[in-house]
Image: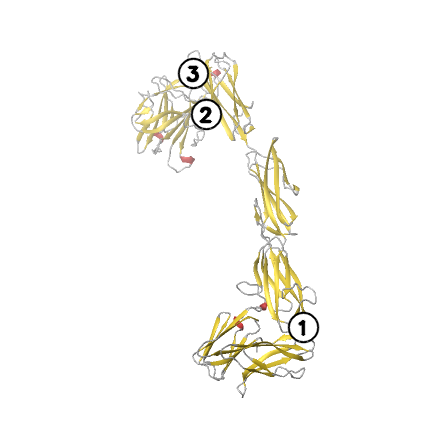
């Protein structure tokens, strides 16, 4: 507040905190700041801007018309005067990196008036004055930065001189005795003006002031009062943020007041503004005053984060805003966590958390301070397929509502599996199942379908009879494991064997263990029976071929029957050969029968097939192929047989006399070549590894080499 003073009696002095006016105009008396200080070596109460009285220059070389040094600027003089105690306070501080010397007799202040020469400081310190050295942060033993003094002085005009030695006896002064500064002490107000700035009718000099919601209106009132002893004109009010303020008038008589106003919109966080007023008194001098005001722009806001437990660990939670979220087995416990945070800048009350499916959620508090958080929890039971719920939070600040929402998800896993077992292509769940001739191949198929709502891994297929090692699920390891079975996917495993007589049943099982994201486990399995009835047919096999002493080719056929015995042997295929000796044998015979093959055409391959019937009508086809492979006139002959069953897995070559020198056998593309053959030589070749499943094999026989000759070839499981 700027006041104008005269030099009336001290009876009307005021102890108001008054700022000094530093005036550099030549021959003008400067005033100190009107306030008190404490002489203790600490400078925190000093204002190094408003309390500055004069620069101090080397050897006192200062231009008083400008206030600038004409030699080095070494230190500064700060003054305060307390009108209530007639005490002058002075502070001398070094400037920049200059350092004062600790010399008591060179550290003093003099004020001159009517021949008086009062001194503050020096050695010794005059009676009635106080003196203290000033060190950085008041720490003793640290290099000095100046000194602080006080001494009694009545209001009047003075010449004043401050002195200190700097950096090795360099004199720093405000001026010589013949060139002093002028000091004016005036403590009786004549002209004065006061401004009080209010925000929403509150005199909020200090923060935080009233709390106003962001976006709401703000009203400022500037109460201007002429509290001096002269009328004032030219009154102008400004706000350091708002700018020029409109007022109802520009002049006030003694004791008169007026209210100026301005409006605005509240912004976020702490707001501060300063109202200022200036006026002119009848002498043309300016008087002024300032007053701060504050408000806090309240932002009420809240956040909710909805988390779903996603793993077995205590802190395993997922912010599953979108699907699918963690996978949880149906029927298992689901745990939700609702993290509520006050993200505004004002405290919140009446906090309520709800879930669109679970309803109201219990929370540890209904209020939150700025920046504070709390955690609410709830549990439920997992249901199948995709689950989604929405958490909501509401709260208010002074009746202003705020809210937020957040989604969370999980996927309810309901794993299941279906197994269908087939025997020779029939879903033979009940007896008797298909009729299969005993000792014939049997083929089982295990069709595994994922009927649940999640992928399955490591599905194992087993059988109550068939060894797991004999089950092949078609993957790289050729074992009984399906590594992955996707939702809705079906895969097939296979096994094969040889049928046995009588009623047969076995149980197939498909099983795995499903583990969800929370480490919950569930066994998933299914079983299915399959059956067949093994029909005991008579046994028939070609067990040998050769040439007898007469040079005739013969075929040895071995038969047996567990039921009743053999009824007949029938030649069902006879190509390029005559067959004799297959009739007239004893019924029920079980010993080998030699059948003669004559009139073999050396130019063509010969084929013979047999069929036997037992006494109750069961029919068995003997090993289906016997061939004479020959070369005549150096021409090779090739015979091809198709649809040969897998069980016929061995080939016997009986060379003739004369015989072949070389023969080639092609089994499903696998070539076997036998050369340098001797007459009557017998060769055995196991071809099981090259035979396909079921009855879809192709075998070709080719006679090679230059000489003419022939050989018998038997394809049979002997």
Q: Residues within 10 Å of mark 3 (few under 14, many from 20)?
A: many
Q: Earlier in the sequence, mark 2 or mark 3?
A: 2
Q: Secondary structure at mark 2?
A: loop
Q: Is residue 9 visible?
A: no
In the displayed structure, 69 sits above or below 603; it is above
Circles 2, 3 touching at the beta carbon (< 8 Å): no
Which mark, residue 286?
Answer: 3
Q: Which residue is mark 2?
A: 36
Q: Which residue is mark 1?
A: 535
| Camera-side mark, 2 or 3 | 3
Closer to the camera, 28 or 337? 337
Which mark, residue 632?
Answer: none
Q: Residues within 10 Å of mark 1 (few under 14, many from 20)?
A: some
Q: Residue 408 at what x, y percent from top left?
A: 59, 44
Q: Earlier in the sequence, mark 2 or mark 1?
A: 2
| Camera-side mark, 1 or 3 | 1
The quadrant holding residue 716 is bottom right
Instruction: Name the image colouring.
Output: secondary structure
Q: Residue 14 at what x, y percent from top left?
A: 48, 19
Q: CA distance from mark 1 to mark 3?
A: 131 Å
Q: Residue 349 at what x, y percent from top left?
A: 61, 35
> Which residue is painted at 45% across and 27% down in the image?
37
């Amino acid at each position: 507040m700027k006041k104008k003073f005269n030099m009336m009696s001290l009876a009307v002095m005021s102890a108001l905190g008054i700022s000094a006016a530093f005036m550099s105009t030549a021959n003008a008396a400067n005033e100190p700041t009107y306030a008190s200080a404490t002489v203790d070596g600490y400078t925190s109460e000093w204002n190094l801007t408003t309390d500055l009285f004069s620069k101090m220059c080397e050897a006192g070389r200062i231009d008083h018309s400008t206030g600038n040094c004409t030699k080095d600027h070494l230190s500064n003089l700060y003054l305060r005067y307390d009108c209530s105690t007639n005490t002058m306070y002075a502070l001398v501080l070094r400037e920049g990196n200059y350092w004062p010397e600790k010399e008591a007799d060179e550290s003093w202040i003099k004020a001159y008036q009517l021949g008086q020469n009062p001194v503050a400081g020096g050695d010794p310190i005059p009676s009635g004055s106080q003196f203290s050295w000033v060190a950085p942060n008041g720490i003793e033993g640290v290099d000095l930065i100046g000194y602080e003094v006080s001494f009694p002085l009545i209001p009047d005009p003075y010449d004043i001189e401050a002195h200190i030695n700097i950096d090795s006896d360099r004199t720093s002064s405000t001026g010589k005795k013949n060139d002093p500064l002028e000091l004016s002490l005036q403590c009786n107000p004549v002209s004065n003006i006061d401004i009080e700035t209010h925000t929403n009718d509150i005199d909020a000099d200090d923060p935080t002031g009233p709390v106003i919601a962001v976006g709401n209106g703000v009203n400022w009132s500037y109460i201007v009062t002429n509290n001096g002893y002269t009328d004032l004109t030219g009154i102008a009010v400004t706000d350091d943020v708002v700018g020029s303020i409109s007022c109802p008038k520009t002049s006030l008589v003694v004791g008169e007041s007026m209210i100026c106003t301005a409006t605005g919109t509240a912004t976020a966080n702490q707001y501060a503004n300063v109202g200022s007023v200036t006026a002119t008194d009848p002498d043309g001098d300016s008087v002024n005053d300032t007053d701060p005001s504050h408000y806090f722009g309240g932002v009420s806001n809240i956040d909710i984060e909805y988390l779903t437990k996603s793993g077995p660990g205590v802190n395993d939670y997922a912010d599953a805003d979108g699907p699918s979220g963690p996978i949880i087995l149906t029927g298992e416990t689901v745990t939700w966590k609702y993290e509520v945070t006050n993200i505004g800048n004002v405290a919140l009350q009446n906090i309520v958390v709800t879930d669109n499916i679970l309803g109201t959620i219990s929370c540890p508090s209904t209020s939150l301070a700025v920046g504070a958080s709390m955690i609410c929890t709830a549990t439920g039971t997992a249901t199948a397929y995709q689950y989604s719920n929405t958490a909501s939070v509401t709260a208010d600040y002074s009746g202003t509502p705020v809210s937020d929402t957040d989604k969370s998800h999980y996927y309810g896993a309901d794993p299941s599996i279906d197994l269908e077992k087939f025997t020779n292509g029939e879903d033979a769940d009940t007896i008797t199942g298909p009729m299969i001739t005993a000792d014939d191949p049997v083929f089982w198929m295990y069709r595994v379908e994922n009927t649940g709502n999640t992928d399955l891994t490591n599905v194992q297929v087993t059988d109550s009879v068939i060894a797991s090692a004999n089950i092949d699920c078609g993957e790289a390891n050729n074992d009984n494991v399906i590594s992955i079975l996707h939702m809705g996917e079906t895969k097939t495993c296979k096994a094969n064997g040889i049928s046995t007589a009588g009623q047969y049943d076995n149980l197939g099982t498909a099983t795995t263990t499903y583990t969800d994201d929370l480490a919950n486990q569930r066994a998933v399995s299914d079983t299915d029976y399959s059956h067949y009835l093994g029909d005991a047919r008579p046994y028939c096999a070609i067990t040998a071929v050769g040439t007898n002493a007469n040079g005739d080719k013969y075929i040895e056929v071995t038969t047996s029957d567990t039921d009743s015995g053999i009824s007949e042997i029938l030649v069902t295929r006879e190509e390029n050969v005559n067959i004799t000796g297959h009739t007239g044998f004893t019924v029920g015979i079980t010993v080998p029968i030699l059948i003669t093959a004559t009139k073999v055409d050396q130019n063509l391959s010969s084929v013979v097939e047999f069929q036997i019937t037992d006494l109750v009508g069961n029919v068995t086809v003997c090993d289906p192929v016997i061939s004479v492979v020959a070369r005549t006139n150096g021409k090779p002959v090739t015979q091809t047989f198709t649809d040969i069953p897998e069980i016929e897995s061995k080939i016997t070559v009986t060379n003739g006399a004369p015989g072949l020198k070389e023969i080639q056998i092609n089994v499903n593309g696998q070539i076997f070549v036998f050369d340098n053959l001797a007459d009557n030589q017998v060769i055995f070749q196991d071809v099981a590894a090259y035979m396909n499943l079921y009855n879809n094999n192709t075998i070709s026989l080719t006679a090679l080499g230059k000489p003419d000759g022939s050989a018998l070839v038997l394809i049979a499981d002997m």
